[in-house]
Amino acid sequence: MKKIIVTGGLGFIGSNLIKLLIKKNYFVINVDKVNYASNFYNTKDFFNKKNYKFVRLDINNRSKLKQILNLHKPIAIFNLAAETHVDRSIDAPTEFIKSNIVGVFSLLEEFREFTKKNKKAKLIHISTDEVYGDVLKGRSKETDPYKPSSPYAASKASSDHLVYSYVRTFNINAMITNCSNNYGPHQHPEKLIPKLIYNIINNKPLPLYGKGKNSREWIFVDDHCEALFKIFKNGTKGEFYNIGSNINSSNLDIAKLLIHISKKKIRLGKNVKIKFVTDRPGHDFRYALDSKKVLRKLKWKSKINLRKGLENTFNWYLENMKYYTTLKKKDITKRLGIVK
């Protein structure tokens, strides 16, 4: 059975990707350092499967990373080990530099050494549309310049550049993906959609930055994982691939749609109302990706529309209330990212 390493596999996208890879009969080694956003609840459905193994490991630990690579000899690594919350990067950028830049450097160095003997191994580095910065008109193409606005986005941009430099200089077999905003089961409720769902279920106001007009391109996590798999199978070394749904919605529209969906599922409390709050410092107004390349070259496009995806997501949180008990309440409710 062919082996694949997924770093950050206790997180949101990583755990959903592992589920897909196991379904496709790969042996998956989940490498995760276990921080606040890591959650063993996300892997409970496959934790005891014979083709799954968990290894607690920070990718900055190069000696142990080397051991794992040489022991399992994976045919691919999907790198999702990253700090991802913009507000946290405003409060504490140091962790983002350590994980998203220095951690990727460590991974690249060990992968470079590993592929001297395992030449067919691939590295798929998962990044974000936020590296492009504000896109007030049109949609970002893979060839567009990076203009990151937050420490988080800057750290991811740096990691993308590092990966590409190792392709050019050391000829490693790596690809870079930049995806739009993900949503779906297992996402930590510090992020917009699961936070709104948590507040709806718990009869709390729905906080939106500014006037809620900021626009994001939303993609259901299963669609993203299918795209990553196609890139792993048929992508080209050194290429960048944008992954998106091509459909934008304002944060206000997302909140209104979730209220509409939830009314059919539960009785809404009187406090479930949209509440505008002080905007995030340096908040980009709009992200939007041009994903024609991945459609043209790999025949991939998103399948799950926003309403259906939000219904699936709301149902999962409603049916998995125990998930919330695995989190610290302050990580759900505390406002972060306020410059003092």
Image (spheres, rainbow, N blue to C red):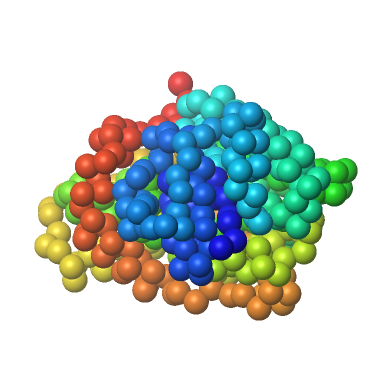
87, 182: nearer the viewer: 182
118, 276: nearer the viewer: 118
Above-or-below relation of 27 to 109: below
Location of residue 299 by image quarter: bottom right
Horizontal and vertical percent position of residue 81: 55, 42
Above-or-below relation of 90 to 201: above
116, 303: nearer the viewer: 116
The residue under the point 35% across, 66% down is 310
The residue under the point 22% across, 42% down is 325
Q: Is residue 186 left or right of residue 199?
A: right
Horizontal and vertical percent position of residue 174: 74, 53
The residue under the point 26% across, 48% down is 323
Horizontal and vertical percent position of residue 90: 51, 30
Q: Is residue 167 left or right of residue 294?
A: right
Asked whether residue 252 appears in the rendered view, the answer is no
Asked whether residue 1 appears in the rendered view, the answer is yes
Q: Is residue 271 left or right of residue 136?
A: left
Q: Is residue 290 left or right of residue 28?
A: right
The residue under the point 39% across, 69% down is 309
Location of residue 159 by image quarter: top right
Residue occupying the far right of the picture:
169
Pick the quarter of the image with the N terminus: bottom right
